[in-house]
Image: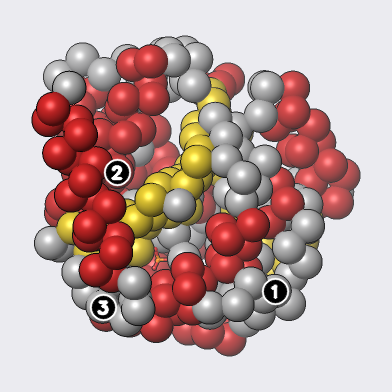
Amino acid sequence: MEVIIKENYEEMSRCAAEIIAAHIKKNPRLVLGLATGATPVGTYKELIRMHREGLDFSQVVTFNLDEYLGVGMDLGKPYHLDQSYARFMHEELFAHINLKPENIHLPDGLAPDPEEFCRRYEEAIKNAGGIDLQVLGIGRDGHWAFNEPGSSLASRTRIQALTKETLDDNYESFYRQAGIAREEMPHFAITMGIGTILEARHILMLASGKKKAQVVAKALEGPVTSQITASAIQLYSGKATVILDKEAASELKNIEYYRHVEKLKAEMEAGR
Ligand code: PGA
């Protein structure tokens, strides 16, 4: 696991976007796993800027991690009520780059048979050849995607009830500003499982801000536990890159070691 500590949110976002862009340049048909939430917004802004400068998404295939159950891009609904992750992705990224619509995969919060949909989502990931690079945040309760505390570390795409902490955070980030009552928020979601995420070939986990510091330290340096599903990163066999800003890294015990490794890596790269 590589831990990169950046000065602030902007630098974290730039670094993440550079890694994603390098993957796309190396493999234009990249299968890219995407995350929602406040954390990746800056990364997506950077990717949009890079696209304007020529970064080509025309063959990239995307899979999103999760979606609230009961919401979706429903054009029949008043716009302000649609707090779906589908709309979020459209506004924050998809509308601004040249992904082909048929290459975009999002869990469908309006699927008539959500369980069947989850099975098909897993199949679609397999048929695409698996996820090459998966972007992840981390929730204050330690979740990856909507894998709330207690989720099996072998779980697959499925329906998940959300914790109070997640509901509180997402209400503040997305629902309050839209004038939606707390009770109207969806309490269930479709989420990729931890087992699904661990099959990605490269994981890119991002966290910023003081309020993530404790949970980041638990996930990276505490015991592996289903109570902090992001701690599954410690079982991960692919390449893991964790990019933090200074505040999110502030509770890490091994911070000096991570910085030392970063410095050695930079020296090696400069020597090439
Ligand atoms: P946030 O959410 O980026 O809005 O903090 C992260 C997450 O829940 O994974």
Residue contact at pointers 3 and 2, CB within 8 angstroms: no
SS under mark 3: loop
Residue 250 circle label: 3
The residue tagged 1 is 226
Judge left or right: residue 267 versus residue 148. Answer: left
Q: Quadrant of residue 243?
A: bottom left
User: In front: mark 3 or mark 2?
Assistant: 3
Which residue is rendered at x = 24% and y = 23% of the image? 51
Q: CA distance from mark 3 to mark 2?
A: 19 Å
Q: CA distance from mark 3 to mark 1?
A: 23 Å
Q: Nearer the viewer, residue 157 or 172?
A: 157
Q: Quadrant of residue 52?
A: top left
Query: Which of the marked residues, 2 or 1, is nearer the chain's N terminus?
Result: 2
Residue contact at pointers 3 and 1, CB within 8 angstroms: no
Q: Position of residue 251 (x, y in %)?
A: 32, 81
The residue tagged 2 is 16
* Residue 269, placed above or below residue 34: above
Three-letter code, disc 1: Ser
Q: CA distance from mark 2 to mark 1?
A: 27 Å
